Image (tube, helix red, strand yellow):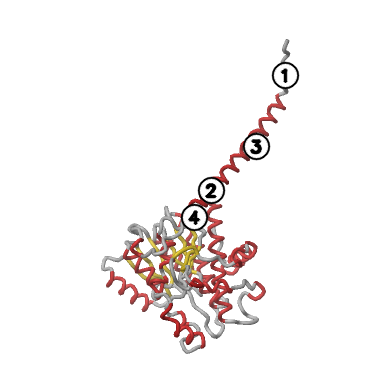
Amino acid sequence: MWHSTAIPAIDVASGMTRILKLARTLTAGIALLSAASIHAADRVAAKPDWSTDDMPSQHGRIALVTGGTSGMGYEDALALARAGAEVVIAARNPERGAEAVARIHKAVPAAKVQFEPVDLADLSSVRGLAERLNRRLPRLDVLINNASIMSPPERGTSSEGFELQLATNYLGHFALTGLLVPLLRESEDARVVSVSSIAAARGVMNFDDLQSEQAYNPFGAYAQSKLAILHWAFALQERSDAAGWGIRSIAAHPGVAVTELIARGPGLDSEFGKRWALDRDKYHSAAQGALSTLYAATAPEAMGGAYYGPTGEEQKRGPLGFADTPPAATNEADAERLWGLSEQLTGVRYP
């Protein structure tokens, strides 16, 4: 004869709780494995000969390009306008801004393009631009952090006293992007594309002398600013994923492109400028250098958290693809330390 034994209610409840916890743990594990599999499956290499002819229509999208009055920034703005985007060029010089807008209108009569003044080395100017855009725009779909200065011979400082390359190339963009996150979150496919450099591979985050006050090396400071951009681009993607912002943060570099950076930085008469001039025929044009940025900004398959650039010899030029990430840019402790310092220095905290 079988005898039934009553199981105390408290034991049933305890057992069910353990089962539910185990089920949640297994479900979470399966979800993580699935996400990892999807992520790996989605790692589709860029079409090596990708060009602006491959860009999807940008009609209905709004893009902001910093430093868009010349060089690769101008090529970014031109290509986006040609594809139908509404483009805002942000840079320091209103006269050059008007010239850039006129050139784009000449090439693309129906272009929707305008200029907004900003000095990335002046955080009050950065805040002013962000306030104007937050008031006027319904959303922001693409933000290309392109503006840059390279290796001025003498150490300069920003309005806040920061080393000029770190301020212009990195801190100004960090602040601008943070202030524009609300607009980016209004987009169904927000992209933040930040332009680094192959020089980042030589960069070191010198937290003991971040502003090069003790010793200034023009190229070392430039490399540090471009390494900082990589740290930030990757960390921004992690935060977007964690907070559900829906922003794709992507880094890109142009290889070596013929732009005005050398003339405005070390100078064409410098030793670096003379060496560069001898080899300039081997390098990308500004339009070619812009392709990695435009791919990141427009290609449906461009991945958040990725780094794109030329894949030829020393990544100076060649077919488009995944760029080599410098080992220093994978140091998560440095990335977190830099993020905290950047919020302190700029006074901008991401939402």
Q: Report which residue position mark 1 lands on.
A: 6
Residue at image location 54% in from the left, 47% down from the top: 35
Give the label on residue 22, or none: 3
Q: Is residue 206 left or right of residue 39?
A: right
Q: Which mark is residue 37?
A: 2
For residue 40, side relative to residue 71 (left or right): right
Three-letter code, disc 3: Leu
Question: Label 4 sits on what residue type?
Answer: Arg
Between 59 and 327, the residue placed more toward the observer is 327
Seen in the picture, residue 285 relative to 291 is either above or below; the reply is: below
> Quadrant location of residue 220?
bottom right
Distance (Cα) linking label 4 and label 1: 55 Å
Asked where in the image residue 76 lies, by quadrant, the reply is bottom left
Closer to the chain start, of discs 3 and 1, is: 1
Tag 1: amino acid: Ala
Q: State the CA–CA distance, disc 3 to disc 4.
A: 32 Å
Q: Earlier in the sequence, mark 2 or mark 4?
A: 2
Q: Classify the position of the C terminus by image quarter.
A: bottom right
Distance CA(mark 1)–CA(mark 2): 46 Å
Q: State the residue lying farthest toward the bottom.
A: 269
Residue 192 placed where, x, y %? 47, 62
Q: Are marks 4 and 1 in contact (CB under 8 Å)?
A: no
Q: Earlier in the sequence, mark 1 or mark 2?
A: 1
Instruction: Report the Cα–Cα distance between label 3 and label 1.
Output: 25 Å
Circle 3 — which element? Answer: helix
| Residues tagged 2 and 3 counted as in contact (Cβ below 8 A) | no
